[in-house]
Image: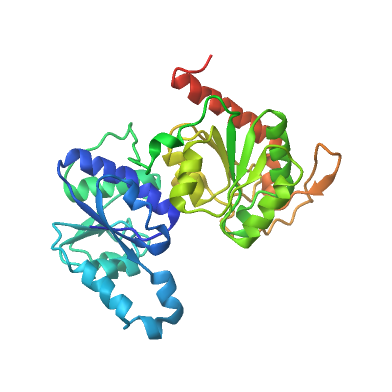
Amino acid sequence: MIVKTSSLGDIIHTLPAVTDAARAIPGLKIDWVVEEAFAEIPGWHPSVERVIPVAIRRWRKHWWRDLFGAEVRRFRQQLKHTQYDLIIDAQGLVKSAFISRQARGPIAGLDSNSIKEPAASWLYNRRHAVPRSEHAVQRVRQLFSRAMGYAFDTNTLDYGIALPGADSHAPDPDSPPTLMFLHGTTWDSKHWPEPYWRELARLASDAGYNVKLPWGTADEEARAVNVAQGLPGVTVLPRMSLSALAGELSASTGVVAVDTGLGHLAAALNRPTVSIYGATNPFLSGTFGYHQLQLRSDLPCAPCMKKHCHYQGQPLTDTLSDGSSFVVTPACYRSAPPEAVLSHLQRIIAQASFSRGVGP
């Protein structure tokens, strides 16, 4: 059993380790405990037999009512249903270690020097050291390989995703190429400025691309509508499930993303992607895969790893194609203007096409 409950990007980062394990151990059967909002994702991997949803995010809002309620009791019964040969806490938090302890079987996880919350390692039967200096994907792969006793090839990478109806998700060669703009994220400091998104949409439309804008919240929908307004070939998608959105990503020619979980999904699906990082550092947890490019800020204060921008230098302005000027906020994104982003994306799209043998 794997315990990896959240977030979207962290769950996706675990999939290559599942592929490694399934290749090394024929007949391996895997159950996966995951937050209910992300329950679709583990099921995309053919080696995952059973997905066990957990609702910690919802339960903790009314913990005094839910902790001893029927829903929690049913969840614990599911955990105890099977005697596991091994339970791997891939989350590395006290809450995930506590979940692991509710199941039946020996528990493996990171040791106290390798883990995010050292107290969690006290609850494991087997502890494994993994260097903190490596990317999250490679760290999980190492944890799994050491816990189950096999070797893996660090030079290969396979997320193992098999989407329902995968044959219908291939890009249509007879239609204009489509770009997906993944503009939604959490921290204020991770947001690429809305005027840049609109300028990028205009440039992409002028270059012959169709553009699709997904959204998941009311604020994201409002931003998508603003970006698309009056631009031909720029479409705001309806709200959709993760599986449906993954299908849209699979059918896209290229992707532009900020630091968001959907950017990791694009990487897992091998979509050529330009990811824009300002306040955060992609080195340890950025998009990871083939045909990926991370644009980082050149400001001295970046990456600040803060939820809100605290830049106090001279305001940085930019002029758009319609002649209007604006102050770029957060300032760190002045180093990633729309023209450069589109140029980078077109380059890696061409490289990806050439590597598949369909380019010039």
Asked whether, in this view, residue 338 is left or right of residue 102, the answer is: right
Residue at (40, 81) in percent of width and height: 63
Residue at (32, 51) in percent of width and height: 43
User: Which residue, as the protein is rendered here, is positioned at the far right?
Assistant: 323
Q: In the picture shown, does residue 328 fall above or below 207?
A: below
Residue 275 appears in the picture as rendered: no
Residue at (44, 54) in percent of width and height: 8
Asked whether, in this view, residue 77 is left or right of residue 244, the answer is: left
The answer to which of 71 and 360 lies nearer the viewer is 71
Q: In the picture shown, does residue 17 fall above or below 221?
A: above
The answer to which of 206 and 127 lies nearer the viewer is 206
Q: How far across and down, in percent of the image, does residue 318 sit?
A: 79, 42
Q: How far across and down, in percent of the image, does residue 49 sit?
A: 24, 52
Residue 324: quadrant of the picture:
top right
The answer to which of 181 and 162 lies nearer the viewer is 162
Q: In the picture shown, does residue 210 fall above or below 8?
A: above
Residue 59: quadrant of the picture:
bottom left
Q: How is the image coloured?
A: rainbow
Residue at (38, 69) in percent of width and height: 55
Q: In the picture shown, does residue 252 fall above or below 246?
A: above
